[in-house]
Image: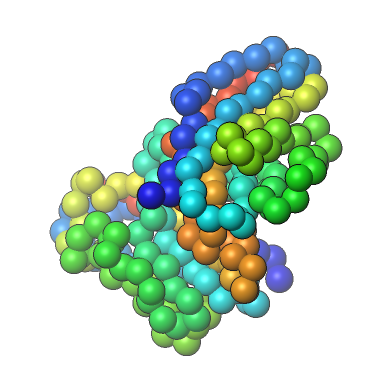
Amino acid sequence: DTGVSQDPRHKITKRGQNVTFRCDPISEHNRLYWYRQTLGQGPEFLTYFQNEAQLEKSRLLSDRFSAERPKGSFSTLEIQRTEQGDSAMYLCASSFLGTSGDNEQFFGPGTRLTVL
Amino acid sequence: AQTVTQSQPEMSVQEAETVTLSCTYDTSESNYYLFWYKQPPSRQMILVIRQEAYKQQNATENRFSVNFQKAAKSFSLKISDSQLGDTAMYFCAHSNYQLIWGAGTKLIIKP
């Protein structure tokens, strides 16, 4: 396994268009996280899944944002009707959370979104 | 509420010097995990070092070591013999099922 992968690495779109990003986690990991990161800032948590269940989505930035993890493996993050303020790096991370509470997360390279 | 505070927005040191990045956190849990992550410019976030709260011994990974003071809720990162490749944003994070992030410290190693 080569780690967490994200596709595409870069996306340029026009305002008002919809975009979808994909994340493939490390195969044995049961948790998958989406973050947004703007320049010079730390990761901003958006949502996470445990297996296929989305356990937290209240931090998604608006109802234009949605995420899925249909079979508990890869996940997609969709942004509808993109706005210039959506321009950022979108990070995906995965972890294996057992009973210990250890939540070391492994990150993908990110998808950089530019909305024109 | 669980929080993580990194009080140094930016630091710079000369190559080969030792630098310490500070981190404090707040939690009511007795068992948890602490992490330092590194994010080089335009590159992927990677784990530098981790500490399990129930272990009293400070974690060490080559040139990177931590000073974990559980009672003070302090978790500082020491980088010895700093190298140009250590230039990056460094994030402290605390975990007990959820990962809580600090705002980061931008570290610049000067030649």
Q: Is residue B13 visible?
A: yes
Q: Quadrant of residue A16?
A: bottom left
Coordinates of residue A20 in the picture (x, y in percent):
34, 68
Image-based side of A45 in relation to B89, left or right: left
Where is residue A66, by image quadrant? bottom left
Q: How many marks?
A: 0
Residue B88 pos. (x, y %):
59, 32
A46, above or below B21, in the image: below
Q: Residue furthest right?
A: B62
Which residue is located at x 38 percent, y 49 percent? B1
Residue sitting at x 49%, y 48%:
B27
Camera-side residue: B13 or A77? B13
Horizontal and vertical percent position of residue A14: 22, 54
Q: Please state which of residues A57 and B57 is positioned toward the viewer in this rendering.
A: B57
Q: Residue at x 73, y 28 (%)?
A: B79
From the image, which quarter does the C terminus of chain B lie in? top right
B18 over A69 or under it: above or below:
above
Residue B46 visible in this rendered orientation of the protein: no
Query: Image quarter for residue B56?
Result: top right
What's the residue at 70%, 53% (across, down)?
B54
User: Horizontal placement of A95 versus B1: left or right?
Assistant: right
